[in-house]
Amino acid sequence: MEFGPFAVAIAFWVFVAVATVAGIVGEYKKRQLTLEPLRAAIEKGQQLDPSVVERLMAPPPESGIKALTLMVWGVLMCSAGIGVTLFAFFLARVSPVAFWPITGAGIIVLCLGIGLVVAARIVDRHQRTRGPQA
């Protein structure tokens, strides 16, 4: 059985599925490790402080969007987009029909990177106006 051009798409979706499951399992293990001291204390019959139990059972606080993270990923995506676009020029010598599709992919990645940089600036401006508590 030959997959042909679908092999890359199948490999991509298998990777996405494995990464998703790995993230879910990782979060489960992290939560399980957080509750392990509580479980051990209950098994030993120790008296539990309600504030400690509440703190351990509460979901972790959300840190929000970090402007620096968006900026770093934006710069990386812009660099990747430029690299893919340059790759199209080199590949065009070997396979001219591949020039426009790969150039389009590079431009899409470049636009995503620019969007992340703009989002980073918006988030940074918003966090500066709301103060450090936001």
Image (cartoon, grey):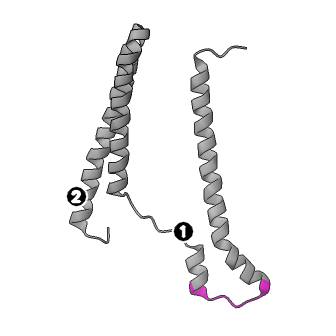
The residue identified by callout 1 is: 59
Please report the residue visible at 55 percent of the width from the left and 78 percent of the height from the top: 55
Please report the residue visible at 34 percent of the width from the left and 36 percent of the height from the top: 79
Whether residues under marks 2 and 1 lie with C-beta atoms below 8 angstroms apart, the answer is: no
Compute the Cα span from label 2 to label 1: 28 Å
The residue identified by callout 2 is: 125
Assign the magenta stretch its main secondary structure: loop
**What x and y, as percent, mark residue 23?**
59, 51
**What x and y, as percent, mark residue 90?**
38, 17
**What x and y, as percent, mark residue 124?**
26, 57
Q: Tell me: residue 43, above or below residue 75.
A: below
28 inside magenta stretch: no
Looking at numbered disc 1 in the image, what kind of residue is underneath it?
Answer: Pro
Quadrant for the C terminus, please.
Answer: bottom left
Query: What element does badge 1 sit on?
Result: loop
Instruction: Tell me, yes or no, if residue 12 can be seen here.
Output: yes
Query: First in sequence: mark 2 or mark 1?
Result: 1
The magenta region covers: 44-51
- Residue 76 or 9: which is nearer the viewer? 76
Q: Tell me: residue 125, above or below residue 104.
A: below
Looking at numbered disc 2 in the image, what kind of residue is underneath it?
Answer: Arg
